Image (cartoon, rainbow, N blue to C red):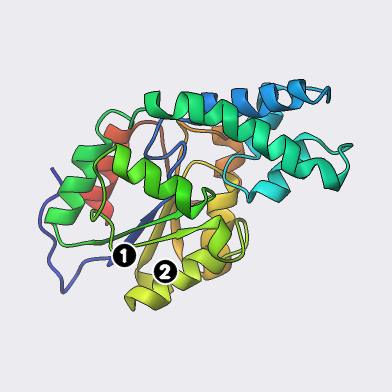
């Protein structure tokens, strides 16, 4: 359990989580749905690494990367096919083991908690309700509410809304996009290597730590946050 912090010496006041691949085990589902959507439209099917790379980006940026030859006027069609595939899987996507307990511990310890995600507002609200996490976060920001990752806009928004500066803000995510968000906002970051991007790529952006499980993340936060 994360111990109650001494507020006079606590390193961070705000902890911001990515959603997909960080709190929920959705990486494989998202990648498969992107591949299936491309297949439906007769487009070349991206390999697993390419499909996983775009997770967390805004939808338009993601579609441009997974289907670079698709005319822009067909993006809504590809988006609709992806959405259909994803919604069929969505009810079965679980939280990572230990994620709920981690959030409970951090909330009990008095940290401000937030989410910065590439999901739409509708998608995040649906996911929060499905996992009974409404109200667990002090603020959330989605890709359709401002500039999407890797632009720092959503993290800057959350810091401003909650009144916490970059030196007291920690971003936790599973992609280089998340780490670039933190860097752009001058905040600190921890990378989780159990999601979409490989540890080597994450480490290249020099996060404070790269962890390989939720249990390891809990341990790092207990000692360093």
- Does residue 198 lie above or below 164 as drawn? above
The answer to whether residue 12 is seen in the rendering is no
Q: Name the mark on residue 14.
A: 1
SS label for mark 1: strand
- Does residue 122 lie above or below 214 as drawn? below
Circles 2 and 1, Cβ within 8 Å, touching? The answer is yes
Q: Which sits earlier in the primary sequence, circle 2 or circle 1?
A: 1
Q: Nearer the viewer, residue 182 or 42?
A: 42
Tell me if 222 is positioned left or right of 88 in this view.
left
- Does residue 211 lie above or below 116 as drawn? above
Point out the image quarter for the N terminus. Answer: top left
Q: Name the residue that disc number 2 marks.
A: 158
Q: Position of residue 209 (x, y in %)?
A: 42, 46
Q: Position of residue 161 (x, y in %)?
A: 38, 75
Tell me if 222 is positioned left or right of 192 in this view.
left
Residue 203, image quadrant: top right
- Does residue 147 lie above or below 38 as drawn? below
Task: Bin the neighbour count of mark 2 within 10 Å (Cα to Cα): few under 14, some 14-19, many 20 and up.
Answer: many
């Amino acid at each position: 359990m994360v111990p109650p912090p001494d507020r006079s010496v606590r390193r961070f006041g705000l902890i911001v989580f990515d959603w997909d691949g960080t709190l929920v085990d959705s990486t494989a589902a998202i990648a498969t749905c992107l591949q299936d959507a491309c297949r439906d439209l007769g487009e070349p099917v991206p390999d697993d690494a390419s499909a996983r790379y775009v997770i967390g980006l805004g939808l338009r940026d993601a579609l441009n990367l997974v289907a670079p030859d698709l005319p822009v006027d067909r993006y809504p069609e590809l988006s609709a096919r992806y959405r259909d595939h994803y919604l069929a899987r969505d009810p079965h996507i679980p939280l990572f083991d230990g994620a709920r307990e981690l959030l409970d511990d951090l909330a009990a310890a008095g940290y401000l908690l937030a989410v910065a995600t590439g999901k739409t507002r509708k998608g995040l609200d649906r996911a929060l309700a499905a996992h009974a996490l409404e109200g667990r976060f002090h603020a959330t920001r989605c890709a359709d509410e401002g500039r999407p990752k890797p632009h720092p806009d959503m993290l800057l928004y959350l810091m401003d809304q909650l009144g916490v500066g970059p030196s007291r803000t920690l971003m936790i995510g599973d992609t280089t996009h998340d780490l670039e968000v933190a860097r752009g906002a001058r905040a600190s970051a921890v990378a989780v290597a159990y999601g979409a991007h490989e540890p080597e790529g994450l480490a290249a952006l020099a996060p404070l730590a790269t962890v390989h499980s939720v249990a390891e993340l809990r341990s790092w936060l207990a000692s360093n946050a």
